Image (tube, rainbow, N blue to C red):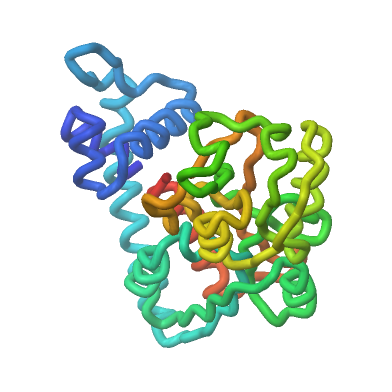
Amino acid sequence: MSCFVKVYDLGSIHKAAEKLFVTPQAVSKMIKKLEEELGRELFARSPQGLSPTIYAHKLYSTANVILSECSRIRGELLEQHISASATLHIATTYGVPKYLTLQFVTDFYDAYPQIHLDLVEYPEYPIYDMLQSGRVDFAFLPQPIDLINYEAAFCFSHDFRAIVRYDHPLAEKKLLCYPDLNGYPIILKGRDFSLYPHNITRFVKGGLNPNILLEISDDSLIVEAARQGRGVGISATFLAEEYADEQVVTIPFEDRNFVRSVFLVHRRGQKMSRAQAYFWQYTTDWILRHPR
């Protein structure tokens, strides 16, 4: 509704995005979602810009009333529970905090200063034990997720890159097929990660007989090993690019299905506290507003 009102007032996706501090793509996505839910076109698109339809005119006054009432209710609820401080214990698989960035945490504290986040990275397999025993409230985990025992909200997906030294025989390639890696030592995330057996199966089916030299949890060391010419590193694209320099080359894979999807996970059947509900809603909203 906020997006709709801004676009209506300004007559522009880009201007509305600037006012809302989000990307134009995020605004377009929310307007499209609203149109799909209502089953009506709210704006006529043309090279000259956007023009509100008759349905937009009808919705506009009602939208402002809804937003005003939501703001009042939100203020009352936060005022009632401002003293209900809490600490949320959150386990994440490696790399998630770097993907979300520090802004994710600081924005949460701006919205909920009374709630403290204890967010720690762990190997994946112990995280499920921590969730099941109630030692953590939430976890950021990659697929596959046990949806019988856990609720999951999609957060983001990322692909992978191969990392090689600048003078490596593969450095000139624009795309890699799995058989291209045959004969080269490989450095990658190891058996503490649920994706490991799936990746090994993917490699073998794709024609690669993987020669695993090192299994490392730290992506900076994967890149460093490639920089030293120890072998071919395999890491998430956003981490490979974070640690790469002029001494290494990152190469995408031809297999576009070589991706990892990460979810926010909560134990099914366990009623959420107010603080937990705030964090669940905040996370899903924040990620929608900050696409990468």
- Residue 240 at x, y = what percent? 49, 52
- Residue 162 at x, y = what percent? 58, 44
Which residue is the extreme one toward the top?
47
Residue 222 sits in quarter: bottom right
Compare residues 81 and 10 and report the one nearer the observer. 10
Residue 267 sits in quarter: bottom right
- Residue 2 at x, y = what percent? 31, 44
* Picture residue at 49% right of the left edge, 78% below the top: 117
Residue 100 sits in quarter: bottom left
- Residue 63 at x, y = what percent? 32, 40
Compare residues 253 and 37 and report the one nearer the observer. 253
* Picture residue at 26% right of the left edge, 37% below the top: 61
Q: Can residue 286 be seen by looking at this rendering? A: no
Compare residues 106 and 191 and report the one nearer the observer. 191
Quadrant including the N terminus: top left
For this view, does 206 lie left or right of residue 99? right
Quadrant including the C terminus: top left
* Picture layout, residue 224 above or below residue 168: below
